């Protein structure tokens, strides 16, 4: 099932209880299962909040890393995001084709590609960040600030 076609009812139950009469005790005790359920819920709602931008999570992640590291090498962005080199070039090309990124030759190594946000890329990223903040507040409304900090700290250990 793709992210875009996840049943809204299933997504809203992902972090809650199983439907009445359905036992999931074994699965409920598995961290991997819970991470996957949380990811499914998050990504479904993320996709819905980004639908009219034409961007996927990986695109927004690339824009974010480039914003914080202007002129960063394309390969370094792929490495930090866990995107294979073979996949990174087409993703950057997509973002360049719609005017959000600009590629240049790296001054220190002419074989490497450095990437920069365009003005349109900066505006789009601001828009996406605002949407993501709303999405995160909604998705994590049952957590306190301390809970969120603890969750992030624990996830970084995995």
Image: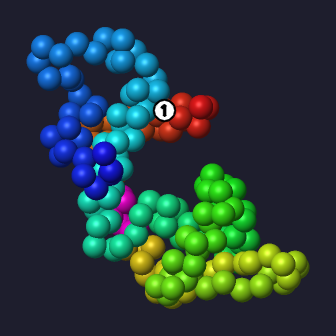
**Residue at 36% of width from left, 37% of height from top?**
38
Vertical arrangement, residue 1 with respect to residue 126, above or below: above
Q: Is-magenta flag for residue 130?
A: yes
Residue 93 is situated, as x and y percent measured from the top left of the image, at: 57, 78
Viewer-side residue, 42 vs 70? 42
Q: Which residues are magenta?
A: 128-133
Q: Which quadrant: the N terminus?
A: top left
**Residue at 55% of width from left, 70% of height from top?**
91
Task: Write down the quadrant of residue 23 in the picture.
Answer: top left
Residue 120 is situated, as x and y percent measured from the top left of the image, at: 46, 86
52 displayed left or right of 55: left
What residue would you read off at disc 1?
150
Vertical arrangement, residue 144 with respect to residue 27, above or below: below
Vertical arrangement, residue 35 with respect to residue 111, above or below: above
**Residue at 42% of width from left, 74% of height from top?**
126
35 displayed left or right of 50: right
Viewer-side residue, 91 vs 107? 91
Predominant secondary structure, magenta span: helix
């Amino acid at each position: 099932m793709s992210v875009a076609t996840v049943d809204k009812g299933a997504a809203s139950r992902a972090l809650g209880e199983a439907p009445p009469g359905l036992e999931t005790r074994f699965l409920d005790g598995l961290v991997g299962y819970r991470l996957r359920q949380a990811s499914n819920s998050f990504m479904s709602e993320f996709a819905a909040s980004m639908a009219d931008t034409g961007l996927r999570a990986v695109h927004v992640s690339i824009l974010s890393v480039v914003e914080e590291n202007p002129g960063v090498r394309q390969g370094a962005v792929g490495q930090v995001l866990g995107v294979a080199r073979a996949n990174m070039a087409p993703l950057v090309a997509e973002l360049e084709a719609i005017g959000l990124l600009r590629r240049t030759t790296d001054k220190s190594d002419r074989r490497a590609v450095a990437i920069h946000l365009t003005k349109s890329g900066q505006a789009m990223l601001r828009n996406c960040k605002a949407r993501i903040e709303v999405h995160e507040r909604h998705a994590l409304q049952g957590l306190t600030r301390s809970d969120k900090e603890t969750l992030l700290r624990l996830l970084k250990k995995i």
